[in-house]
Amino acid sequence: MDLQHRPGGKTGSGGLASASETNLDRRERMRQLALETINLNKDPYFMKNHLGSYECKLCLTLHNNEGSYLAHTQGKKHQANLARRAAKEAKDAPAQPAPEKAKVEIKKFVKIGRPGYKVTKQRDPETMQQSLLFQIDYPEIADIIIPRHRFMAAYEQKVEPPDRKWQYLLFAAEPYETIAFKVPSREVDKDPKKLWTYWNKETKQFFLQFAFKLDQKLNQPTLPPPPTNQPRSLPLPQRMPPPPPPVVPPMSLAGMMPPRPPPPMGPPPVAPPPIPPPSSLPPHGPPPSAPLPTAPPPPPVPPPVRLPSVPNIPHPSVPPPPPPPPMPN
């Protein structure tokens, strides 16, 4: 029989496994995996008999190996028997009472009424914090009892409809009734210098003082209003200042001098055109031997006289007269 040239066979390897051999190998592999996670020594229903086989004491079944027993424990019959056994044990077990919760006994005493009180509004001159000072009188209080106080939110009480804007300050002491004061629901300053209590055993008076924290919204500087999209009216343009008044000339000793004319506002004076030569004159002009007429010289300008009582006012600059035209030879 040729065992090397069969289909699917390789030289040096065994033959193809049959279906039974494959199933046996699979069960052995599953048994090894189950033994790694499950300890049969701790199973109360696993038992090995004198024949070398294994039994299930719960279901009364017989198994040839450990793998068969492990497969049986995952089956429907074994799981149903486990549930039935657990229900029976729970029914037969005596009912154990639930552990009792610790109860706080309510102390009962005869109340004799409300204590007297006095409330004083204060303000710290340095920090400008608002504070309240409470004085509660307990003349009939026992010597071993010290009054207590507590802040309560508006949602903890059931006497009035809850309002988030208010909170309550409670004072309690036996045998008096508990009294509460309605104060604004603002944050209380926990500084020991701001929040303190004092119990005077001699006068039987209880004092409490606390201060509210400053509101940060009030301390912030006010900001300017936001700019609007509306166009702003522009300021009117300023007019040009008027021209200065004319300068008054100084007075002379002889009398008042006539005021000088103001300087011309137009263009500067232009010199007259030159006189053409004699050859270009017409025939009816003056003879060549006669002298040409000349323009009279301008009158002399008197110098200004300064008076001690009159301030020194500068004269306006006057342009000099134009030069005379050149004389022909």
Image (cartoon, rainbow, N blue to C red):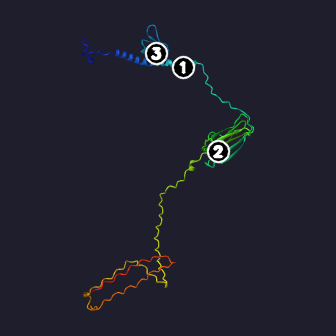
Q: Quadrant of residue 70?
A: top left
Q: CA distance from mark 2 to mark 3?
A: 72 Å
Q: Quadrant of residue 205?
A: top right
User: Reading the chain from its start, which is encountered first: label 2 or label 3?
Assistant: 3
- Identify the residue position indicated by label 1 in the image: 87
Q: Position of residue 133 (x, y in %)?
A: 67, 44
Which residue appears farthest toward the top when viewing the image? Answer: 50
Of discs 2 and 3, which sits in the foreground? Answer: 2
SS of the residue under disc 1: helix
Q: Is residue 242 left or right of residue 202?
A: left
Of discs 1 and 3, which sits in the foreground? Answer: 3
Q: Are marks 1 and 3 in contact (CB under 8 Å)?
A: no
Residue name at image x 68 percent, y 46 percent: 120
- Identify the residue position indicated by label 2 in the image: 183
**Tag 1: amino acid:** Ala
- Identify the residue position indicated by label 3 in the image: 40
Q: Position of residue 182 (x, y in %)?
A: 65, 44
Q: Position of residue 78 (x, y in %)?
A: 47, 17
How many residues crowd around disc 2 within 10 Å: few (fewer than 14), some, or many (20 or more)?
A: few
Q: Position of residue 294 (x, y in %)?
A: 33, 87
**Tag 2: amino acid:** Val
Quarter of the image with the N terminus is top left
Q: CA distance from mark 1 to mark 2?
A: 61 Å
How many residues crowd around disc 1 within 10 Å: few (fewer than 14), some, or many (20 or more)?
A: few
Q: Which mark is residue 186?
A: none
**Tag 3: amino acid:** Leu
Q: Is residue 259 left or right of residue 217?
A: left
User: Reading the chain from its start, which is encountered first: label 1 or label 2?
Assistant: 1
SS of the residue under disc 2: strand
